[in-house]
Amino acid sequence: MNYVVNTSTTGTQYQVTVETQDSSATTLDGPTNSFYFSICQNSCHTNTYHIPWSSTVSTTTNYTTKFTTATTTPNNAKFKLTFPTGFNIESVTFSTSSDFDGGFTLSTTSQTIILQRDSQGTTTATGTKYFTLQNITNPSTPSSTYYAILETTDSSDNNIEGPTRIRFSISSAGLGLAVSPWPIFAHDVKHSGRTTTDGPSYPAVKWKYSATSDIHKTCCTITPHMPQFLLK
């Protein structure tokens, strides 16, 4: 639909309701509420993902939050990530991020984790970013409709982007990335091929294959004390 004017009030719990009716206004299907969506003061983060490395209930795990920015990020900006009630963030630590030079400081207040750039880097251009946090404990209750809220502010807490609502799931069986030295292709969501796990002390060729056409999705693996080698 075109020419829909958003409300002037920002929020993260907006929904639309869809109902199918016949020509006599008799309900055929619905009414069905959508998932929550956000109306933001400036712009909302897009292409958002909130990825538990383990989505099993009551598990302590890592979380990667991936998003695309429409606004440049100052070198002292804050990322505020709010978890739902029931998630334990008391022991959270920062792991890694993409496309940000300089460092971060981390603090928490209630259910919100605040990652602040330390002013040592440069203003970051718009585009796809992510950061990974460690030592977050999932709640004991499974649900497919948990929401995290992400907001970017300047150092004085003035809004830059968001707050953006991001849906994710916690299950009894677990659906997230495995808690292992190599949970996904090329190790992490940036597909860096880097690992903190040592490789073999005496590397040797396991097997060879002579390809007759292009090989896609090969991965260069880099370990702390070993030169890189190829996995095909």
Image: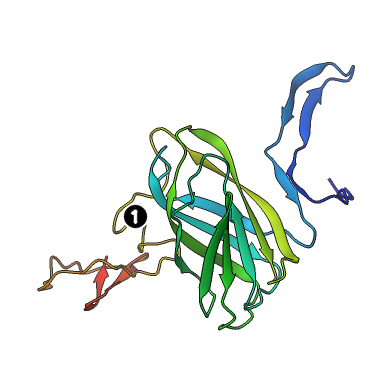
Q: Is residue 70 left or right of residue 174?
A: right
Residue 84 higher or lower than 28, as above or below: below
Report the residue marked by disc 1: 183
**Residue at the location (62% across, 78% down)?**
75
| Residue drawn at point x = 71 percent, y = 63 percent | 161
Position in image of residue 28 (x %, y %)? 76, 18
Whether 128 is drawn above or below 109: the answer is below
Q: How many marks?
A: 1
Q: In screen coordinates, is 178 left or right of 148?
A: left
Q: Name the side, left or right, on which 108 lies relative to 227.
A: right
From the image, which quarter does the C terminus lie in?
bottom left
**In the displayed structure, does residue 153 sit left or right of residue 86?**
right
Q: In which quarter of the image is the N terminus?
A: top right
138 and 34: which is toward the camera: 138
Q: Residue at x 45, y 34 (%)?
A: 140
Foreground residue among 232 and 166:
166
Q: In this view, does 98 lie above or below 32?
A: below
Query: Which colour assignment does the render follow?
Result: rainbow
Q: Whole-percent x and y of residue 129?
A: 56, 67
Q: Nearer the viewer, residue 220 or 197?
A: 197
**Quadrant hosting residue 221:** bottom left
Provide residue 184's location: percent of width, then percent of height. Answer: 36, 56
Looking at the rendered structure, the secondary structure element under dot 1 is: loop
Type of the residue with mark 1: Pro
Front in this rendered view, residue 114 or 127: 114
x and y percentages locating residue 18 in the rendered image: 77, 31
- Label 1 crowd bin: few (<14), some (14–19), many (20+), radius 10 Å: some
